[in-house]
Each structure stands twice: as structure tokens, then as C-alpha cells.
């Protein structure tokens, strides 16, 4: 059992860390009689201010603690293309910066899917990993077929422009170099473009399970 106030694991009816009455919380929740206001937590490590230092509200309302703040690139005065940034629960690489917005892509693949399952996943389960403040920080972008999305795959042109070599395009899934999908039209033979595990460009059957590497435009103000 975990204390709903401070997050400390406890097998007792009263939290050993903060003294909160866990049994009372359980009764209140079960009766739905009272709304309990929990302590705010850091969006990155999940800890309270009591556990890891003062909480700051920064980028688009995202909360961050003193422990995490120094490793969060968006809090630094200068952002550079190619540097890494923590957003949500993922590490991202900055590919481009323009007008207080940054194009970012995950450092690693988030899962493997057939091509036609990728965009429903990005706009559904993956997007829902982010809290409302984080989703509000994402720029809605018009992509393929004039569809407005917040999370997408890079196109062939973008992957060519924003990575200087095949080596820079190499990424991993569960510790192994893995191919990843690009967006674009499907050929009449049922193939779509992707990046191979060595970082080169290739075409592959859309039914194949290939890595998904999400990208998005992020507001920096």
C-alpha cells in the first residue's frame, strides 16, 4: 500500500513518513464523500517537494523539482540542435529550433509496430502518456493527407536533412540497433520507407513490425 499524500510505501494504517491516516483516506475515497487535494509532484521523478526540494512550475505549467531541474535542458538559457532534452518520461533529441519551437525526436524507439498501426498508436496510447500540460506544450502540425497531429513520424526529407550521417540515424530498441519507420506514401507493392538498423534508408513491407520513433514540435515559451 502507498500513502496517497506523500507516496511512501506503508503496510500500516498510518503513514510512517507523514502521519497521514491511510484508513481514513480509504473510507473517504470509497464513499466518494470528500475530494482530497494531494500534494503536487514533480512531473519527472514523481516526488513531492518534501522528498526532493522546492517545486518549480516551468514550461507550459510542467512542474519540476530542484533535484531534476539541472538535468532538464529546457530550463537552460541556450538550446542547441543535437542536444538531448527530457520531456514527459522520454529523452528526446533536438533536431531544429525556430520561433520558440523545437522539433524533437525520441532518442530511442518506443515500440515496434506494423506501418498502418503507427499513427493510431501515436495519436492514442502514446499521446495519453503525457499529462494535459505536456500535451498543451505540443504544437499541432499538419502532416500527411492534411491531417492535424501532435505526434508524428519524420519524413524521408526530414530524416535526410536533420541527421548528418547514417551513424547519427542509428537508434536502439531494448539495447539492440533496430530499424524505424518514416512517414510517406505506401508503394503499390505495399512497401514504405524506413531507416535500417545501420542508419541507411530502405523500403520494407508495411506488415513488418518495425520500430516507432516519435517526433513532435514543442513550444519553448
Image (tube, grey):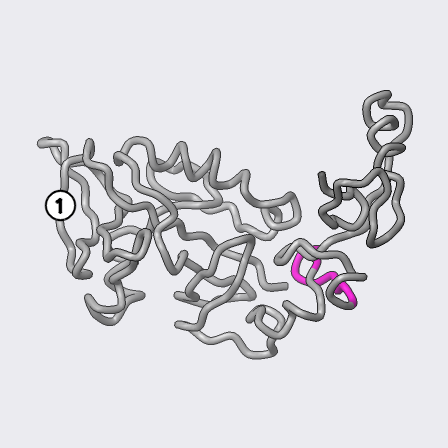
Residue at 83% in and 46% down: 15
In the visual, does 142 lie left or right of 19? left
Q: Position of residue 128 (x, y in %)?
A: 54, 38
How busy is the neighbourhood of tag 1: few (under 14 within 10 Å), some, or many (20 plus)?
Answer: some
Q: Position of residue 131 (x, y in %)?
A: 62, 44
- Residue 99: image location, x then y, percent: 53, 66
Span highlighted in magenta in the image: 54-63
Q: Measuring 73% from the left and 65% from the top, which residue is drawn there?
A: 52
Q: Report the side of 217 relative to 115 (left or right).
A: right
Task: Give 1 or 197, whichever is nearer the viewer.
Answer: 1
Q: Quadrant of the C terminus?
A: bottom right
For the residue pair 106 and 143, the one nearer the viewer reads as 106
For label 1, the residue is 203
Residue 95: image quadrant is: bottom left
Asked if residue 20 is among those painted magenta in the image, a careful observer would answer no
5 to 43, vertically: above or below: above
Residue lying at the far front of the rendered structure:
12
At mark 1, the secondary structure is strand
Q: Is residue 156 left or right of residue 136?
A: left
Quadrant of the image for the N terminus?
A: top right
Q: Nearer the viewer, residue 38 or 159?
A: 38
Amino acid at each position: 500500500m502507498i500513502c496517497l499524500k506523500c507516496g511512501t510505501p506503508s503496510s500500516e494504517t498510518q503513514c510512517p513518513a507523514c502521519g497521514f491516516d491511510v484508513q481514513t483516506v480509504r473510507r473517504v475515497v470509497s464513499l466518494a464523500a470528500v475530494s482530497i487535494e494531494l500534494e503536487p509532484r514533480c512531473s519527472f521523478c514523481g516526488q513531492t517537494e518534501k522528498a526532493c526540494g522546492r517545486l518549480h512550475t516551468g514550461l507550459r505549467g510542467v512542474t519540476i523539482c530542484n533535484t531534476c531541474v539541472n538535468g532538464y535542458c529546457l530550463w537552460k538559457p541556450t538550446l542547441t540542435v543535437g542536444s538531448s532534452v527530457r520531456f514527459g518520461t522520454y529523452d528526446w533529441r533536438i533536431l531544429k529550433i525556430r520561433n520558440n519551437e523545437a522539433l524533437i525526436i525520441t532518442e530511442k524507439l518506443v515500440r515496434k509496430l506494423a506501418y498502418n498501426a503507427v499513427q493510431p498508436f501515436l495519436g492514442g496510447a502514446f499521446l495519453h502518456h503525457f499529462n494535459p500540460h505536456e500535451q498543451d506544450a505540443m504544437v499541432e502540425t499538419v502532416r500527411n493527407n492534411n491531417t492535424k497531429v501532435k505526434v508524428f513520424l519524420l519524413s524521408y526529407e526530414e530524416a535526410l536533412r536533420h541527421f548528418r550521417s547514417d551513424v547519427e540515424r542509428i537508434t536502439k530498441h531494448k539495447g539492440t540497433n533496430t530499424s524505424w519507420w518514416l512517414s510517406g506514401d505506401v508503394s503499390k507493392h505495399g512497401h514504405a520507407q524506413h531507416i535500417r538498423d545501420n542508419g541507411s534508408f530502405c523500403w520494407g513491407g508495411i506488415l513488418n513490425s518495425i520500430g516507432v520513433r516519435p517526433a513532435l514540435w514543442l513550444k519553448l515559451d
